[in-house]
Amino acid sequence: MRTNAVRWTTLTYILLFAIQMFGSIFIFWTSMPSFRQLVLRPGEQAASTPYDSNLVEAVLVEMQAAYWYRLLKVAIPLRGSNVLLPHLFLFLGRLNFIFESAVFAVVIFRHLPELGLDVDVLLMAPRGGLLLFTLFALFCFTLELGRFGVALGETKRP
């Protein structure tokens, strides 16, 4: 009976982690063209972005649901004394954070100061809110990668 509970917890954790990971990858790949446009043409308001579709919003909601359910209901079941895997997951967490930081820096310090008076505030406000929600979801996944990396570095408890 105990092994079934451990197995169920492990599978649940892996599923929730995978949802967050694939969501993060999806956000990265779909937002890369918009990021490139922000870097190359600061101050120019794009007619459309990947964030204009409901698919990105759905992915972000799924990422957040998986993160908070895992944090509140599912303990990290995997422990170990491996040396390489904890470093790998901590490194991936830092890379995720670097991407978030780059997006934030480009938008706040490069793009916004270049916007003119003809900016469409009704278009910009929801996109800004969605950008903050995206950055928060990626930040939560960064925390999850760090927690998982630390857990993999811990020794198993009896």
Image: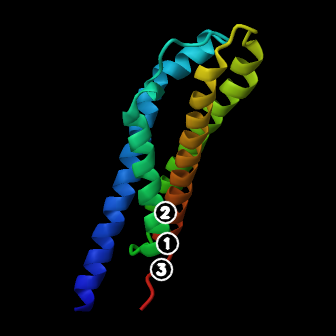
Circle 3 is placed at which residue position?
155
Residue type marked 3: Thr
Nearer the observer, disc 1 or disc 3? Answer: 1
Mark 1 → mark 3, Cα distance in angstroms? 23 Å
Badge 1 or badge 3: first in the primary sequence:
1
Residue type marked 2: Trp
Mark 1, other Cα within 10 Å: few <14 / some 14–19 / many ≥20: few
Give how far across and how far down residue 65 sits, in percent.
43, 57
Residue 122 falls left or right of residue 89 = right
Residue 149 falls left or right of residue 39 = left
Residue at (50, 62) in percent of width and height? 149
Residue 91 in view? no
Circle 2 is placed at which residue position?
68
Q: With respect to residue 108, does 3 lie above or below?
A: below
Residue at (30, 81) in percent of width and height? 6
Residue type marked 1: Leu
Who is closer to the viewer here, 149 or 61?
A: 61
Q: With respect to residue 10, does 112 lie above or below?
A: above
- Contact check, label 2 and label 3, Cβ < 8 Å: no
Q: Tell me the element at label 3.
A: loop
Circle 1 is placed at which residue position?
72
Residue 142 falls left or right of residue 114 = left
